[in-house]
Amino acid sequence: MKEMITSVKNQSIKNWAKLTQRKYRLEQGLFIIEGEHLVEEALTSDWEIETVIIEAGFEPPFDLSSQKIEFVSHNVLAHLAQTKSPQGILAIVKIKETGRYLTNRLLLLDSIQDPGNVGTMIRTADAAGFDAVILGDGTVDLYNDKLIRSSQGSIFHLPIVQSDLSTEITRLKNDGVVICASTLEQAVPINTIGSSDKMALMVGNEGSGIHSELLKQADVLAHIPIYGQAESLNVSVAAGIMMYHIQLSS
């Protein structure tokens, strides 16, 4: 077995520990994932894994023979992990530039800052058969560890772009994509709108909603009726309902 790293002062460990910060992720072009499920999802995708980090004594349930592996002690793994009870395996993954993507079904996120909500919406977009997700300005960084865990590996299976939404909407509309914005003001119930061959759903910040200038670019304004006493729905729940309506109405 390769020599085990036992000190958090090891240079590689110090470099990887910095990946919890967006600045260093961008500088190194790397991000970190943890747990059996996420590592396996990355392995079965077209993303490139730089290094797999395994706690001594942990037996991975999948083949890693083609991967570079570093064995570490428990204290070192705990130092790198973001969860309280890490599973014994991490991976360092190379950030990948998103290429071209289909524009039949898209999810646009405006200034959504909760990583758990964004990760859940990416996972739901994947499940609902959407083609891509576009993260607008002010939205949490794609490689945030909580976002990645909440996505359950879906970040590896559909294109996700971080871009200016106004520019993207203009481009999409020129391509014949109908923009449906989730909002309460001057909006029709989501169940009353039909679905176009090409449609993008845009949802906004948990507190303030979609920016007014982006709402002006939308073709359709829609909301989900509230039948009980709740004031509103969680943004990821609302996005899930709307995505499935758009998909099932086609």
Image (spheres, rainbow, N blue to C red):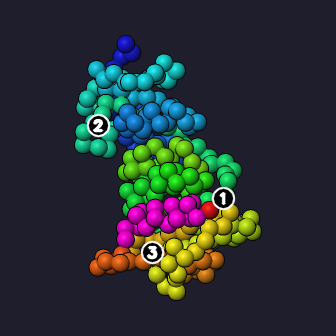
- Residue 72 location, quadrant: top left
Which residue has dot 2 on it? 86
Q: Is residue 185 visible?
A: yes
Q: Identify the element where label 3 is drawn.
A: loop
Query: Which amino acid lies under the numbered mark 2 shown in the image of this protein?
Result: Pro
Nearest the eye: 38 or 128? 128
Query: In screen coordinates, is 113 left or right of 178?
Result: left
- Residue 233 location, quadrant: bottom left
Which residue has dot 3 on it? 224
Which residue is at 58% across, 43% downward?
Answer: 96
Query: In screen coordinates, is 1 left or right of 128?
Result: left
- Residue 6 location, quadrant: top left
Region in magenta? 233-249
Q: Quadrant of the N terminus?
A: top left
Task: Name the dominant secondary structure of the magenta segment.
Answer: helix
Q: Are marks 2 and 1 in contact (CB under 8 Å)?
A: no
